[in-house]
C-alpha cells in the first residue's frame, strides 16, 4: 500500500508526550469488573512496564492484587508512560498511564466477564479505499470500526479447533493480505472470504486496518465483498484514474488525501450477510453493463473457493443470473454487429461468456 495513502487516511493527531518524571514512582491501583454483577478477581497478578517516549521498555515490575487493590513500588521514574496489565479468565486486560507530576500514579484496571452472543457486534464504520497498484493490480486499504455494545468481552466461537472471534471481510480473490491496527499477526487466519481474528473484542469500539491486493482484468473488476455484521454504512473511496459503478453505492463527494483526489461512494445500513458489489475499472476503459457481466462470470469461477471456505457466504447462482448471462451474450453480439468490437475481441469475450453460462447451468442443475 502506498505510504502516502496510509499516512493520509489513517493520520491521527500527534499529542506531545509528557517529560519523564524525576525520582521514584509508585503505581497505586484498583481492579474493577466492568460487567454488571461481575466478581472482583481474587489474588490477580498485575504486571507494569515503564516505557520511554519511543516505546522502549526500561523496567517491569509485578504485584498481587488483594481484593482488587494493588501497589507497585520501585520504578525509577525515567519513563514517559506505564502499561499496566492483568489476566482474567485467560484474557489480558491493560491500561496505559502517562506520567504526571506525582510520585504516586493512580490506576484503574478494568476486566469483564465474557459472551459468545454475536448480536452484540456491529460495525460503526467500514471504509474501503482502492487505488491503482503495480503490475495491473488494485491495492485495497480496509479500515473498520467495530462496536461491542455489551458490558462483556466477546470471545466468539471455536471453528475447526481454532478460536474465531472477529470476521473481517476481504473481497473475493484478494491476496497479499497485510495486517495492521487491531490485528495480532500470530492470532489471525486468512481465508478466501476474509480474515478471522482470534483476539477477544472488549466492550466499546475497536479499530481494525489491513490491506490486500486484487488482480484487475483489463476490462474491469467486479468487487464482491460480504458484510459480516450489521453495518451503519460502507464507504468506498476510488483513487485517481479509477471509476466505479454499483447500484448499491451512491456518489457522495470528492475528497483529497496526500494531494490526490478520491471519489467517495456510500451504501447505507447493509445487514449481516449482504454482498457488496461494485464494478471497478480504469477511467480510460468503458464500464457499460457488458463489463459488469464479464466480471460476474470471472467471479463465478471463484465460487468454489467461497463455498469451500470456513465461513460460507450465502452465494449461489440463480435462474436470474443465468438469464443475465444470456442477455450479455446478446448484447455482445449487438456490439459486434454495430462495429464496436473487432472479430477477435468478440470471439474471445463470447467464449468466456459461454463458458460461464455452462458453469452457471451446471450449478442450477445440481
Image: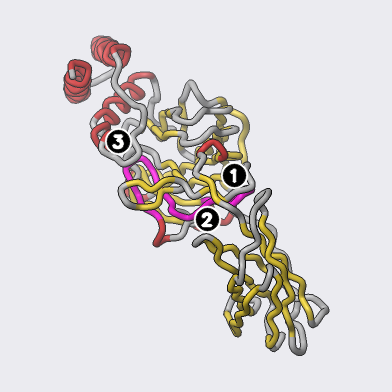
Identify the secondary structure beneath mark 2.
Answer: loop
Spot occupied by residue 256 in the image (x, y as percentages of width and height):
61, 44
Q: Residues within 10 Å of mark 2 (few under 14, many from 20)?
A: some
Q: Is residue 223 above or below residue 210?
A: above
Q: Are marks 2 and 1 in contact (CB under 8 Å)?
A: no
Q: Position of residue 146 (x, y in %)?
A: 57, 44
Residue linked to disc 2: 182
Residue beneath the point at 26% across and 28% down? 300
Q: Residue at x 53, y 54 (%)?
A: 6
- Residue, x 26% and y 14% (percent of image)? 322
Residue 136 is situated, as x and y percent measured from the top left of the image, at 33, 44
Q: Any mark on residue 306, and which?
A: 3
Quarter of the image for residue 359 reads: top left
Say which label, 1 or 3, has the lower sequence index. Answer: 1
Mark sitting earlier along the chain (2/1)? 1
Numbered disc in front, either 2 or 1: 1
In which quadrant of the rendered image does the C terminus lie?
Answer: top left
The residue singled out by tag 1 in the image is 148
Q: Is residue 316 above or below residue 80?
A: above
Give the camera-side residue of 307 and 181: 307
Q: Is 156 or 342 nearer to us in this picture?
A: 156
Q: How is the image coloured?
A: secondary structure
> Residue 245 versus residue 335: which sits nearer the camera?
245
- Pick whichever, 365 or 71, lies toward us: 71
Q: Which residues are magenta?
A: 188-208
Q: Which mark is residue 342?
A: none
- Specify whether residue 207 is in view: no
Q: Compare marks 2 and 3 and give the one earlier in the sequence.
A: 2
Whether 281 is among the magenta residues is: no
Magenta segment includes 190: yes
Determine the secondary structure under disc 3: helix
Amino acid at each position: 500500500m502506498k505510504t502516502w495513502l496510509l499516512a493520509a487516511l489513517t493520520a491521527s493527531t500527534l499529542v506531545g508526550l509528557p517529560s519523564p518524571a524525576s525520582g521514584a514512582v509508585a503505581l497505586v491501583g484498583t481492579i474493577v469488573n466492568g460487567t454488571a454483577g461481575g466478581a472482583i478477581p481474587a489474588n490477580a497478578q498485575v504486571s507494569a512496564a515503564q516505557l520511554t517516549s519511543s516505546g522502549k521498555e526500561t523496567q517491569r515490575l509485578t504485584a498481587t492484587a488483594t481484593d482488587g487493590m494493588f501497589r507497585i513500588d520501585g520504578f525509577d521514574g525515567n519513563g514517559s508512560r506505564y502499561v499496566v496489565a492483568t489476566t482474567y479468565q485467560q484474557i489480558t486486560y491493560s491500561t496505559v498511564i502517562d506520567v504526571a507530576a506525582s510520585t504516586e500514579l493512580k490506576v484503574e484496571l478494568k476486566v469483564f466477564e465474557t459472551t459468545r452472543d454475536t448480536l452484540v457486534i456491529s460495525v460503526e464504520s467500514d471504509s474501503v479505499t482502492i487505488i491503482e497498484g503495480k503490475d495491473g493490480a488494485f491495492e485495497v486499504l480496509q479500515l473498520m470500526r467495530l462496536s461491542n455494545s455489551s458490558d462483556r468481552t466477546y470471545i466468539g466461537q471455536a471453528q475447526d479447533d481454532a478460536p474465531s472471534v472477529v470476521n473481517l471481510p476481504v473481497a473475493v480473490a484478494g491476496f497479499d493480505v497485510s495486517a495492521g491496527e487491531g490485528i495480532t499477526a500470530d492470532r489471525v487466519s486468512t481465508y478466501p472470504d476474509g480474515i478471522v481474528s482470534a483476539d477477544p473484542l472488549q466492550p466499546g469500539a475497536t479499530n481494525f486496518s489491513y490491506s490486500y491486493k486484487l488482480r484487475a482484468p483489463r476490462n474491469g473488476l467486479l468487487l464482491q465483498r460480504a458484510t459480516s455484521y450489521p453495518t451503519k454504512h460502507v464507504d468506498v473511496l476510488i483513487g485517481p484514474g479509477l471509476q466505479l459503478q454499483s447500484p448499491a453505492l451512491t456518489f457522495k463527494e470528492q475528497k483529497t488525501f496526500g494531494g490526490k483526489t478520491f471519489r467517495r461512494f456510500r451504501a447505507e445500513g447493509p445487514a449481516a450477510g449482504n454482498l457488496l458489489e461494485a464494478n471497478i475499472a480504469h477511467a480510460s476503459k468503458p464500464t457499460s453493463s457488458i463489463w459488469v457481466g464479464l466480471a460476474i462470470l470471472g467471479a463465478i469461477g471463484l465460487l468454489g473457493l467461497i463455498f469451500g471456505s470456513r465461513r460460507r457466504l450465502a452465494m449461489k447462482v440463480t435462474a436470474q443470473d443465468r438469464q443475465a448471462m444470456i442477455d450479455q451474450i446478446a448484447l455482445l453480439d449487438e456490439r459486434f454487429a454495430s462495429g464496436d468490437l473487432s472479430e477477435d475481441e468478440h470471439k474471445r469475450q463470447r467464449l468466456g461468456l459461454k463458458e460461464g453460462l455452462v458453469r452457471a447451468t451446471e450449478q442450477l442443475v445440481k
